[in-house]
Amino acid sequence: MKYLGIKPQKARIGVFDFTGCEGCQLQLANKEGTLLDFLSLVEVVNFREVSSDKGQDYDVALIDGSITRQDEVERIQEIRARAKVLVAIGACACFGGVNQQKNRFALDDVVAEVYGDHAKDTLPVRAVGDVVKVDLAIPGCPVSKDEVERIVVNLVLGSKIVMPKYPVCVECKQRGNTCVVDLGQICLGSISRAGCGAPCPAAKVGCLGCRGPAEEANIDALKEALMERGHSESEILESLRFFGGFNGMVDQ
Amino acid sequence: MSNTTMKVDVHHLTRVEGHGNIRVTVEDGQLTEAEWAVVETPRFFEAILRGKPHHMAPTLTSRICGICSIGHTLASLRAVENAMDVQIPPAARTLRLLAKHGETLQSHALHVFFLAAPDLFGTTSVFPLIESHPEVVGIAARLKGLGNDLCDLVAGRTTHPVSLVVGGVSTIPSKRDLEAMKQSVQDRMEDMEAAVALFETLDLPDFVRETEFVSLKGDGSYPWIGGDLVSTDGVVKPEADYRAMTNEYVVDFSTSKHTKLSRESFAAGALARFNNNYAFLREEARATAAMFGLRPVNHNPFMNNIAQLVECEHAMLESIDMIDELLGAEDPDIRAEYEVKPGQGVGAVEVPRGILYHDYRIDADGLITKANCVIPTTQNNGNIHLDLPDLVKQSVSEGKTDQEITHLCEMLVRAYDPCISCSVH
C-alpha cells in the first residue's frame, strides 16, 4: 500500500504463544477474506507458528495462552520489556481459560495422574495479567476473529477501542434464537460479555461465559432462576468455573 | 562422514504448532546426539477431566487443540457414547463426518501451504509469497477458507465447535445453505487441481527410512471415525484395544510421551492412512497420487505433504456426496435420547495428523472418573526422533553444509505436521 507514492511505516506486530491450544492466534490466519487487507496495515515480525522470522523489534505483542511454568514467566517478562503495547488474546491469556481448572487439584496429584513417576515441571495456572501488566484484554475461547482484527486496526490507527459491555443475551435475541434456558439448559448468556455473536445458543447449546462477565452481571439472580428450573448448584458452578472469567465472583 | 564435525541446534522450531527443539551433534564423523525434544508446557487434561459431567467432556477436550478441535470433540463424543451405549441417528453421523471433512481440508491446507510450502519456495513464511506468488496464496486461502466455511456451517464454528453434542448434533443446516455449500465445494475443485499442478513443480527431499504405519482400517470406505486399527506390519486390533496398539511410555527429554508397536517407533497421519487404505480412496484421488509416484507402502516422510493433498481431493468429493445425501432426507432425526449409565468407552478418530484416541470411565451419575487421550503427534514423536539420525547421516555423506542439514531437519519435523501442544495435552 502506498500513499502519494510513499510506502507508510507499518505497525510491527509480534504474536507469542504460551500454554494453550494456539487456536486464538490461528484466528488471525483464519480470516482468509480480509487477511491481505489486514497485512497491508501491519507488519508481522514474529509469529512462530506461521513464520521463521524472529524479529525482536515489535510495537504490539499479542499474547495467546496462560502462564504455567517458570520459563514462561521469564519469557513473558522479556516480551513485556520490549513491547509498547501488550494485548492478551483469548480466555487462557485473559483469565486462565480451561487450563485454570487444574488449580482445583493439588499440583503433585495432576502430575502423577498424567506422568506417573516421571514428574514434569508445572506451576499453578496464571493469567498473563497476573504476571505482567496487560494493556488490553480480548477474551473468548476462541477470540472472535473480527474483533481481534478490528481492535488491532483501531490500536494501530489510534482510534478509540470499544468492546461491548452488554451481555450475550442481547446478541442472541437479535438473532431470533429460542432461549436455551427455556429449552431446559444452563446458559450464562445473561451475565457474559457479548461480542461473539452468540454462536453457542444459536446452535442450541448454553453459553459458558468464555468472554467473562458483562458489566453489572447479576450472578446470584441467574443462579436462583436456574435453580428454580431444577438445575443443581454444583452444575451451575461447574459452568461458571469452566473458563475462569467469573473466578473471584463465585465460590471456589 | 569420516572427520566431519557439526551441530544442529534449533530452539522452538518455527512453522509448527507448539514448542519443540532439534539437537544433533556429529563429532569427528560420529553421530553423538540426535534428539527431537518436545518442551511444550503440559496442561493435564486427563487430570482435569476427573469429576466432570460426561456431556462437558467434548466441550472441554476440544480445547486440547486449536487446529483439530472438531476431531477431539468427535473422539470425545464417541468415547462417551460407547461408554453409555448411545446410538446416534444416521443423519447425525453424516453431519459429523462432513464437519470433520471441513477440518481436514482447513488443517491440511494450512499445513501444506502456510507451514511447509515456504521451505519449497525458499522463504521464511507465507507472507513474502503474497507479493511473489499471489496465485499460490490465492489457492491456499480459498481452499482453507472452504474448509473453514464447511466447519462453520455444520459445526457452528471452526475452532471449538458448538453443535456436536452427545447423542448426535444439535442443529442441521437449511437445505438452502447446504445447496450453496455444495456449489462452493464444486467451485473449489478447480483450485484443488491447481494446487496439485503447483506441487508437481516443487521438489520434495528424497529420504527413506522404513517404519510401521498405524491407522484406522477401512471397511468399505476410507476410514475417518471408529472401526478396527491396522498397521502396515500386519497388526489388526479392535478399537477398544488401542493401548496394545500404542504402548505409550514417558521419556525424560520430552514432555510428550512416545509410543511403539512392532518396531522402535511408528508413524500416524495422512501417509499412514494412505498406506493402509489406498484401495478405498476415490479414483480421482488415486490418480493424483500416481502423478507424484505415490504408491503404498511409501516410506518417505516428506510424502506426507502429498498424501495430505490427496486426502483433500478425496474429502471434497466425499463431501459433495454427503451433502446430496442430506439434501435427499426430509427432516431427519439428528439427536438421540439416551440414558445415563456407568461404563467405559473408547473413541478412535482419524484427525488430520493421524489417529486419535479418547478413553473414559463414567460412573452411575454420568461423571467421568478416569480419562486417557493418545494424540497423533505423541505417536509420531518417536518416529521423528529416529528419522533424525538417519537423515543427518545421509546428508553428511552427500556433503551437505551445516545450514542445509539444519534446514532439512526442520523440514523433516514439519512434514509430520506436528501438533505439539496437542501431544502435551
Image (cartoon, coloured by chain):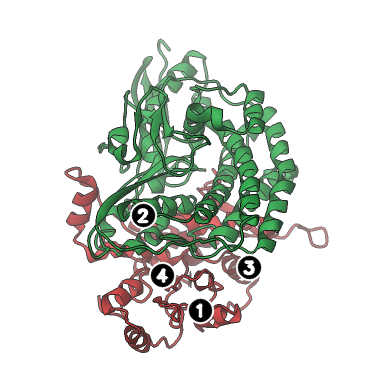
Chain colours: A red, B green
Say which quarter of the image contains residue A29.
bottom right
Q: Please tell me how crowded label 1 is: few (under 14), some (14-19), or many (20+) other residues with Cα within 10 Å.
A: many
Q: Residues within 10 Å of mark 4 (few under 14, many from 20)?
A: some
* Marks 3 and 4 share the same chain: yes
Q: Please check whether the numbered discs 2 and 1 fall on a single chain.
A: no
User: Nearer the N terminus, badge 3 or badge 1?
Assistant: 3
Q: Is residue B199 visible?
A: yes
Q: Are marks 3 and 1 in contact (CB under 8 Å)?
A: no
In the picture of the structure, the residue carrying the numbered disc 4 is: A133
Of all residues shown, which one is farthest toward the right? A4
Q: Position of residue A139 (x, y in %)?
A: 47, 70
Q: Are dots 4 and 2 in contact, CB under 8 Å?
A: no
Q: Chain of mark 2?
A: B
The residue mark sitting in front, 4 or 1, is 1
The label shown at residue B59 is none
The residue that mark 3 highlights is A153
Spatial separation of the CA atoms under disc 3 and disc 1: 24 Å
- The secondary element bearing badge 4 is classed as loop
Could you tell me how far apart the alpha carbons at marks 4 and 1 are, in whole angstroms?
28 Å
Q: Position of residue B72 (x, y in %)?
A: 42, 51
Q: Nearer the viewer, mark 3 or mark 2?
A: 2
Residue furthest front as drawn: B330
If you read the primary sequence from the N terminus, does the residue marked by circle 3 or circle 4 appear first?
Answer: 4
Q: Is residue A6 above or below residue B373?
A: below
Q: Residue at x 58, y 48 (%)?
A: B106
Question: Residue flagged by tag 2: what amino acid is it?
Answer: Glu
The answer to the question of whether label 2 and label 1 lie on touching residues, with beta carbons closer than 8 A, is no
Report which residue position mark 2 lands on: B81
